[in-house]
Image (cartoon, helix red, strand yellow):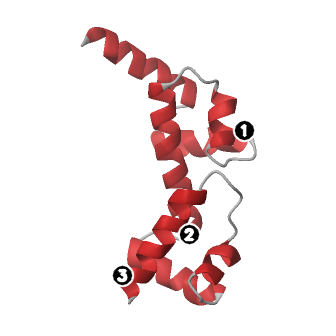
Amino acid sequence: SESRRIQKVINFLNNNYQKEIRLVDVANHVNMSEVSFSRFMKKRTGKNYIEYLNDLRLGIASRYLIDTNKTIAEISFECGFNNLSNFNRIFKKRKGSTPREFRDNYSKMRILI
């Protein structure tokens, strides 16, 4: 049942990452209290809820940076970040470069190959 529950959480997040999703919303979706859900999420994924959600959003944003010509602001908002500077800060912390540097570096690699 825990496997079904975590799959339900992952599906919910994959389908709603572009919206504001509060911890209470996801906990209610799987009929758990916020505290129980937080412990469950950390145990099953190795990440807390916010880390997991941000990693999901950053993965999708990275794909958009590579595959589209959308502005960084457009990508940020489409991926569920409500603040561009917050997106830039989290992206740099997790990926080691700013979104612009990431896009530029990937573009250079594609030209070389």
x 69%, y 78%: residue: 24
**Along the polypeptide, which appears first: circle 3 or circle 1?**
3
Q: Is residue 12 above or below residue 92?
A: below
**Along the polypeptide, which appears first: circle 2 or circle 1?**
2
Amino acid type for the residue under numbered disc 2:
Tyr
Amino acid type for the residue under numbered disc 3:
Ser
x 41%, y 71%: residue: 46
Quarter of the picture containing the C terminus is: top left
Total marks placed: 3
Image quarter of residue 23: bottom right
Labels 3 & 2 near each other (Cβ < 8 A):
no
Image quarter of residue 13: bottom right
Residue hosting label 3: 3
- Badge 3 marks a residue whose secondary structure is helix
Quarter of the picture containing the N terminus is: bottom left
From the top left corner, tell me how far across and down residue 77 is, in percent: 69, 40
Amino acid type for the residue under numbered disc 1:
Ser
Residue hosting label 1: 85
x 59%, y 89%: residue: 32
Residue closest to the far top: 111
Q: Residues within 10 Å of mark 1 (few under 14, many from 20)?
A: few
Q: Residues within 10 Å of mark 2 (few under 14, many from 20)?
A: some
Pair 3/1: label in front? 3
Q: Is residue 16 above or below residue 1?
A: above
Residue hosting label 2: 49
Labels 3 & 1 near each other (Cβ < 8 A):
no
Q: CA distance from mark 2 to mark 1?
A: 21 Å
Using the rendered image of the protein, determine whether residue 102 is visible from the camera's viewpoint: no
Labels 2 & 1 near each other (Cβ < 8 A):
no
